[in-house]
């Protein structure tokens, strides 16, 4: 270095150049980064919180007027002009205030924030030990969303002078460097206290702050920006509009207890502890008479006993509530290490501690009644309806995350009988903190979070709470429906536990028996009529022999008249018998049709399961084929390039690449071939299959893919003789494909968390059984009894359907076989063996 100014070839000094910013950019940033006036106010209140203030008062005066001098541009001759401004907003606090240096760096230097360094160093405020919420230095731009003129008066020490600055946002105009926007600076005498007062004059939209209806809507909007669920222990917020105090909404325990269901969770960094409780009224539904007859009659005791015996009850520790307000309580614990670390194909990370509460109202209403959901609560109902939704609060200040960020509406839009959480029936919150969740970073516009690994981890945990709530509600409602149906069966005289197929068969038998009896009655009726006719003939003969005026004649005539009446009666009854016989004949045909329909329905259900199974297998195959097809495309491009060289080396390279393409194409053909037995034309065929050889071929076909994932396959040695099963090849392929893909998913996740562990899939033939297992984490204890139920899965939403194990259990059932979870437990204390029993298919 010579110490001389560096010059370019034109002789111009580099020091003559510097970066600058046009003042108009600031106005563009303010317009884009702050959504609405409420968010702008919230940012100013958060500044007071960060300033270690004990209170913050917001005064909105839409009718206030002030005349302000407009300073001229600094580079021009100062021109004094005055402007009348309407409307004023004042934000006051008793916080730490700002000295001149802090004012310059904290307010007048856009995007520079001393709070950022405090958060990086883990520093807190001296008085209330708060971790600052802001760190972007952009919140101040929100003031231009409120009004044009900004005046800040601040005192950083009770006994020292303060300072006041003021400027017009409208003077941040195009063509003027930001450093030349006119500012007015004044020194203020000490006033014996600290704090800051921000005045915004010349409000952008005066009507926005006027009128009773508008103020009420504003009150509700502001009530969601500051948590209505939890109160500050050391920070008070006051709001007045037009000189009238406005109370923000606060949900008391009494109000929240009007909910039909309540869910909450606590994440302590290692485990997500979830709990829920519901009221008896959740089961009422639209058939109130059934609810009163079977549930209210004994205060839900019989229903509780029935639900307690269901498979899902153990998984959520279902119990009768000890509170008189609630009916049932349940809970579940998910360890952080149990969550898949890949969420929607991206990695997740621990977000830090948080808590949540969700309140659901009137879960039994139908879709068309959603508009009237909160009517029964009167004035409170309109407030609940207006504030419905799930909010995220950081230190009691809302982080906007978009409408229905938790996607409660996805399931609601899928069907009309859904009884889970919905956007319009749920009110709740997730509470995070600046200190406990520093990696949950808000976007610059405060509209949600930056989607990093920590946010995906937070979303994965929040989704678990949603799934816990929805699954529990669905299981309880389904359990109640079964309980109600069984009660109806009991009252109708049907044998308990009889299936629909058995009922149809019983109806068929009754119809045939009735038809036989009807035929017998018909013959019997003819015989009775014949006997009666003979009796009448004999009596007429006797009547003719008796003198007409004798007592015997009169007695016989009377008997004959009685027999005539009896004959007419028998004739009428014979007609009734014939009608009954005809009706029974019709019912006999109907019973045959019903039995046939059940058989058809069962066939269709089995076919549906198999078709869905093929779809799942094809879906997995598509993921395998994509990289192979991409490799073919890449090598084809190399072939083209090599041929274009017109050289011996180029043709040799092309030949080599074509050989590789042929090998890959052959591999694709082999992979595709395993779908062939699943196609409909092969469905009904059964063949003798050597199970061990079948499994070996199955593993060999998947060796390349599994080897790349670091997964090894083994067929464990056994003393059992070769197992030959007579079974449909396509169905057997579906069973193995699902078990293998299930193991593959959990082994990949387990391997990411435990890179030192061996990843293995094992198959073992033990007598008439196939034992299939892997070295992964095993089945979570809460799912042991429900793992083969439909829609039960431990995979994140979008990565698992909860169909695979259910479908193969049904497919095996069609072959007279079964699958169950073995009783052995692995080192994690979990059951891990899937046992397929081929007893009924052994040749």
Image: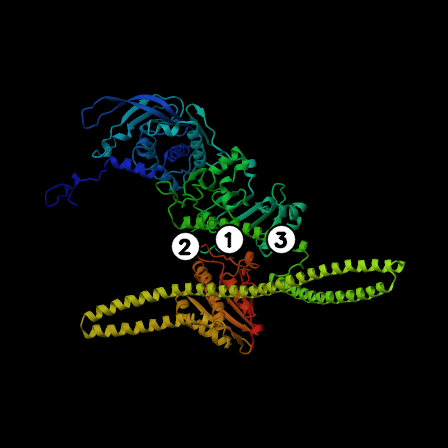
The residue under the point 28% across, 30% down is 169
The tag earlier along the polypeptide, 3 or 1, is: 1
Secondary structure under the numbered disc 3 in the rendered image: helix
The residue labelled by disc 3 is: 483
Please state which of residues 543 and 253 is positioned toward the viewer in this rendering: 543
Asked whether the beta carbons under mark 1 and mark 2 sit within 8 Å of each other, the answer is no
Q: Nearer the viewer, mark 2 or mark 3?
A: 3
Q: Secondary structure at mark 2?
A: loop
Is 418 in front, or is 130? 418
Q: Is residue 208 visible?
A: yes
Q: Nearer the viewer, mark 1 or mark 2?
A: 2
- Pointer 2 local density, CA inside 10 Å: few below 14, some 14–19, many at least 20: few
Q: Are marks 2 and 3 in contact (CB under 8 Å)?
A: no
Q: CA distance from mark 1 to mark 2?
A: 19 Å
How far from the left and from the top, in percent, is residue 655?
25, 74
The residue that label 1 is drawn on is 335
Q: Secondary structure at mark 1?
A: strand
Query: What residue sits right under mark 2 in the picture?
Result: 344
> In the image as oriented, which residue stretches furthest toward the front?
548
Q: Is residue 499 left or right of residue 117?
A: right
Based on the displayed image, in which of its 4 quarters is residue 843 positioned? bottom right
N-term-proximal mark, 2 vs 3 = 2
Picture coordinates of residue 147 (x, y %)? 33, 29
Give the percent coordinates (x, y) of residue 593: 58, 64
């Amino acid at each position: 270095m010579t110490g001389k100014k560096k010059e370019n070839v034109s002789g111009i000094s580099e020091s003559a150049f510097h970066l600058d910013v046009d003042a108009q950019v600031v106005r563009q940033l303010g317009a884009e980064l702050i959504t609405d006036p409420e968010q702008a106010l919230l940012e100013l209140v958060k500044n007071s919180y960060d300033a270690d203030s004990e209170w913050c008062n917001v005064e909105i005066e839409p009718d206030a007027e002030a005349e302000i001098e407009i300073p001229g541009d600094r580079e021009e001759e100062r021109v004094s002009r005055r402007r009348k401004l309407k409307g004023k907003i004042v934000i006051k606090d008793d916080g730490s205030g700002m000295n001149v240096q802090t004012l310059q760096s904290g307010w007048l230097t856009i995007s520079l924030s001393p709070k950022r360094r405090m958060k990086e160093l883990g520093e807190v405020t001296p008085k209330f030990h708060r971790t600052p919420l802001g760190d972007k230095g952009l919140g101040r731009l929100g003031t231009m969303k409120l009004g044009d003129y900004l005046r800040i008066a601040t005192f950083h020490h009770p006994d020292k002078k303060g300072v006041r600055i003021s400027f017009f946002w409208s003077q941040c105009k195009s063509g003027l460097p930001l450093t030349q926007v006119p500012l007015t600076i004044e020194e203020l005498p000490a006033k014996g206290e600290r704090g800051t007062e921000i005045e915004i004059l010349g409000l952008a939209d005066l009507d926005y702050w006027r009128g009773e209806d508008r103020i009420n809507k504003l009150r509700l909007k502001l009530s969601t920006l500051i948590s209505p669920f939890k109160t500050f222990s050391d920070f008070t917020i006051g709001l007045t509009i037009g000189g009238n105090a406005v109370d923000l909404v606060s949900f008391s325990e009494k109000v929240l207890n009007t909910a039909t269901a309540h869910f909450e969770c606590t994440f302590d960094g290692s485990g997500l502890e979830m709990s829920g409780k519901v009221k008896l009224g959740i089961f009422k539904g639209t058939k109130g008479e059934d609810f009163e007859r079977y549930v209210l009659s004994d205060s839900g005791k019989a229903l509780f006993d029935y639900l307690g015996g269901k498979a899902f009850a153990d998984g959520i520790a279902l119990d009768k509530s000890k509170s008189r307000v609630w009916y049932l309580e349940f809970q579940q614990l998910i360890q952080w290490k149990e969550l898949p670390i890949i969420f929607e194909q991206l990695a997740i990370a621990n977000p830090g501690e948080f808590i949540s509460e969700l309140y659901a109202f009137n879960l039994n209403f139908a879709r068309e009644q959603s508009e009237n959901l909160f009517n029964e609560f009167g004035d409170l109902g309109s407030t609940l309806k207006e504030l419905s939704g799930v909010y995220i609060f950081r230190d009691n200040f809302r982080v906007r995350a978009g409408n229905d960020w938790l996607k409660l509406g996805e399931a609601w839009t899928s069907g009309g009988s859904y009884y889970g959480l919905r956007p319009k029936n749920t009110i709740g919150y997730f509470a995070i903190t600046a200190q406990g969740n520093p990696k949950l970073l808000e976007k610059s516009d405060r509209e949600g979070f930056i989607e990093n690994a920590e946010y995906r981890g937070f979303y994965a945990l929040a989704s678990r709470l949603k799934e816990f709530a929805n699954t529990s509600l669905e299981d309880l409602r389904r359990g109640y429906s079964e309980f109600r149906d069984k009660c109806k069966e009991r009252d109708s005289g049907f044998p308990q536990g009889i299936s629909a197929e058995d009922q149809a068969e019983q109806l068929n038998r009754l119809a045939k028996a009735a038809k036989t009896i009807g035929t017998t009655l018909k013959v019997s009726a003819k015989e009775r009529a014949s006997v009666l006719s003979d009796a009448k003939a004999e009596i007429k003969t006797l009547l003719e022999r008796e003198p007409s005026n004798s007592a015997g004649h009169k007695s016989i005539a009377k008997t004959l008249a009685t027999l005539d009446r009896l004959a007419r009666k028998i004739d009428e009854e014979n007609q009734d018998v014939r009608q009954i016989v005809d009706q029974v004949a019709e019912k006999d045909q109907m019973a045959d049709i019903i039995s046939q329909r059940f058989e058809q329905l069962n066939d269709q259900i089995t076919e549906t399961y198999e078709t869905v199974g093929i779809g799942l297998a094809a879906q997995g195959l598509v993921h395998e084929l994509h990289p192979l097809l991409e490799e073919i495309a890449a090598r084809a491009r190399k072939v083209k390039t090599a041929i274009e060289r017109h050289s011996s080396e180029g043709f040799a390279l092309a030949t080599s690449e074509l050989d590789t393409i042929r090998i890959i194409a052959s591999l694709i053909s082999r992979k595709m071939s395993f779908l062939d037995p699943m196609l409909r034309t092969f469905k009904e065929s059964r063949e003798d299959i050597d199970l061990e050889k079948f499994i070996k071929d199955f593993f060999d076909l998947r060796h390349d893919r599994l080897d790349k994932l670091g997964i090894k396959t083994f067929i464990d040695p056994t003393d059992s003789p070769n197992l030959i099963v007579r079974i449909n090849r396509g169905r057997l392929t579906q069973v193995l494909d699902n078990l293998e893909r299930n193991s593959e998913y959990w082994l990949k996740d387990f391997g990411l968390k435990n890179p030192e562990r061996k990843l293995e899939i094992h198959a073992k033939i033990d007598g008439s059984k196939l034992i299939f297992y892997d070295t992964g984490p095993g089945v979570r204890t809460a799912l042991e009894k429900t793992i083969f139920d439909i829609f039960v899965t431990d995979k994140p939403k979008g990565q698992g359907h909860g169909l695979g194990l259910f479908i193969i259990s049904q497919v095996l059932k069609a072959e007279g076989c079964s699958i169950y979870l073995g009783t052995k437990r692995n080192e994690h204390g979990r059951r891990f063996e899937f046992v397929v029993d081929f007893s009924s298919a052994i040749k």
